[in-house]
Amino acid sequence: MTAIANYVDQGFDPLLGKNPELRWGKTLPDGDQRPWKDLKVGSLYVYYDATNDLARTFRKAKNDQRDDDWCVLGGLHCITETVTRAQFTDGGSTAGTYNLAENIPAGAWVMQTVLENVTGFTGDTSAVLIVGDGTDTDRYNTGTPSVFTTVTALDTGVPSGTKIHTAEKTVTLTITSGADFTNVAAGQLTIRIYYLK
């Protein structure tokens, strides 16, 4: 376990005892281990995923010294990532795929997927996108919006699959070209997936 060396100590209240704290580190919270089990309910912990350069904020909701004492801070969340053509894996036919670095957590309710700053995936005669979870290939959008043309913003439609998540899911982007994905020479997009948790 990596020790958490950085924190803001909010002090001691003579009536309530030790106050909640704000801490941060590179290890996910582990509710039955120190220092997480010693922190007061209401404490916040910012987890930094150095591999993917992502951050998530957790709140200590109860003190049972279990991992589920800590939950991702509730409310509206947004997964966002900019992806280039070079990051897609060529499937050997018309399609290329890419898995986003951040997953959709269990308990999330997906609301909408949008694209921004699309630089057309050109080199073939067309390019369309679907956004899925690896099993349901278009779970997070409706139809097959074109990413062949450069556009500032694109609504991909409401989720076509089940919105509630009973398990964590990896987001898979699939771009299908007109003839062969190898022909797609360029392209970039920023995807944003909004969910409640």
Image (cartoon, helix red, strand yellow):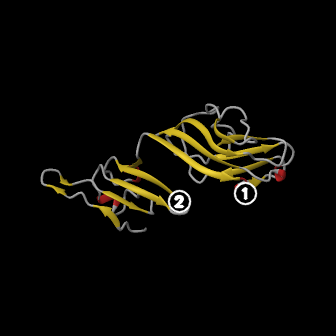
How many other residues sit within 10 Å of disc 1, few (<14), some (14-19) or many (≥20)?
few
Mark 1–mark 2 Cα distance, whole angstroms, equals 19 Å
The answer to whether the residue labelled 1 contacts the one labelled 2, judged by CB atoms less than 8 Å apart, is no
Residue 13 at what x, y percent from top left?
Answer: 16, 54
Q: Which mark is residue 145?
A: none
Residue 29 at what x, y percent from top left?
Answer: 41, 57
Residue 159 at what x, y percent from top left?
Answer: 61, 33
Q: Secondary structure at mark 2?
A: loop
How many other residues sit within 10 Å of disc 2, few (<14), some (14-19) or many (≥20)?
few
Q: How many marks?
A: 2
* In-front residue for pair 33/80: 80
Task: Residue 193: name its quadrant.
Answer: top right
* In-front residue for pair 167/2: 2
* In-front residue for pair 155/150: 150
Residue 72 at what x, y percent from top left?
Answer: 43, 47
* In-front residue for pair 123/58: 123
Mark closer to the chain start, 1 or 2? 2
Identify the residue at image location x=20%, y=58%: 11
Q: Which residue is mark 2?
A: 53
Q: Residue furthest left?
A: 14
On screen, residue 15 versus residue 57, left or right, reads: left
Name the residue type under label 2.
Asp
Identify the residue at image location x=23%, y=54%: 19
Q: Which residue is mark 1?
A: 86
Locate the N terminus by quadrant: bottom left
Q: Is residue 178 above or below residue 16?
A: above
Q: Secondary structure at mark 1?
A: helix
Q: Is residue 116 above or below residue 22?
A: above
Task: Residue 175: name its quadrant.
Answer: top right
Name the residue type under label 1.
Ala
On screen, residue 17 versus residue 183, left or right, reads: left
On screen, residue 163 versus residue 96, left or right, reads: left
